Amino acid sequence: MAPTDPWNTGNHERDWEGYFIPGTEVLRNRVGASTVQQLHDAETDLSEIRLLELREKPELVAPRLYDLSHLSAIHRQLFQDVYEWAGSIRTVGTEKDGESFCPPGNIAQAMLPVAIEIADTKQLRTVPRDKLPKKVAYLYDYVNYAHPFREGNGRTTREFFDQLLAEQSLGLDWSLTDSAELYQACHTARADSDLSGLIGMFTRILDDNPAYDF
């Protein structure tokens, strides 16, 4: 019998602990990082290299179905040098500042409306330009709530939407926002069912400079 990954034993407490190097608060990693800062620095550098590789060779993530498998493929591409579980759905619950994300067993269900909406709108091509910020905000809220991975959700989600908008030669200028605005907009969308923050942000950062040349 093949050994069980320590983060996928079927026991929540053991799975939670299994993501970490024993006796530390550092996630298990492929780079030999033994502190949170070392891991953060390595993750930033290595994922940026893999992002540039993906931008040059988008066929590394194919097919582009804009579903959970597509999102997982992007995560695997970005974090393959850092985490053994790159591209794998998390096995534990997670939260940020007291706000819980989707339970692991429901992640596929949470992502299903995203895939359906994108397919029904022919990768958003049937959505008028002035309606796109609202549509993207709606979809982004779903993906953010799904939060499918133990780490790296933000970068993976941004790239997912960069690819999606590039299908119609549009882009998102993420330099026009920051993590504080994005977090607050996502929090308001989830806690108050209010997408106005996300809609305003996407209205401002939507542009004609796609990240990919499809």
Image (tube, rainbow, N blue to C red):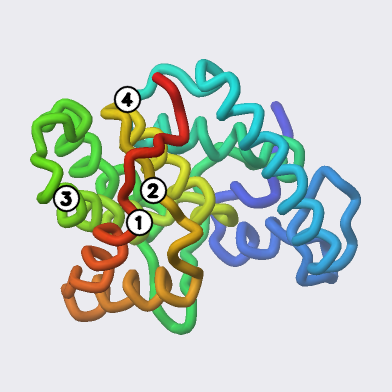
Q: Amino acid at mark 3?
A: Lys
Classify residue 205 by image quadrant. Answer: bottom left
Give the mark nearest the N terminus, 2 or 1: 2
Query: Residue 135 bears which disc, if any?
Result: 3
The reply to whether dot 2 and dot 1 touch (C-beta < 8 Å) is yes
The reply to whether dot 2 and dot 3 touch (C-beta < 8 Å) is no
Percent position of residue 210, x then y: 40, 35
Label 3, residues with CA under 10 Å away: few <14, some 14-19, many ≥20: some
Cα separation, mark 4 vs mark 1, equals 24 Å
Residue lying at 80% horizontally and 52% vertically, measured from the top left: 42
Helix, strand or loop at label 4? It is loop
Q: Amino acid at mark 2?
A: Leu
Cα separation, mark 2 vs mark 1, equals 5 Å
Residue 132 falls left or right of residue 3: left
Q: Is residue 94 above or below residue 70?
A: below
- The residue at which mark 2 appears reads as 172
Cα separation, mark 1 vs mark 3, equals 14 Å
1 or 3: mark nearer the eye? 1
Classify residue 41 by image quadrant. Answer: bottom right
Q: Is residue 134 above or below residue 179?
A: above
- The residue at which mark 1 appears reads as 205
Residue lying at 69% horizontally and 57% vertically, measured from the top left: 19
Query: Residue 179 bears which disc, if any?
Result: none
Q: Amino acid at mark 1?
A: Ile
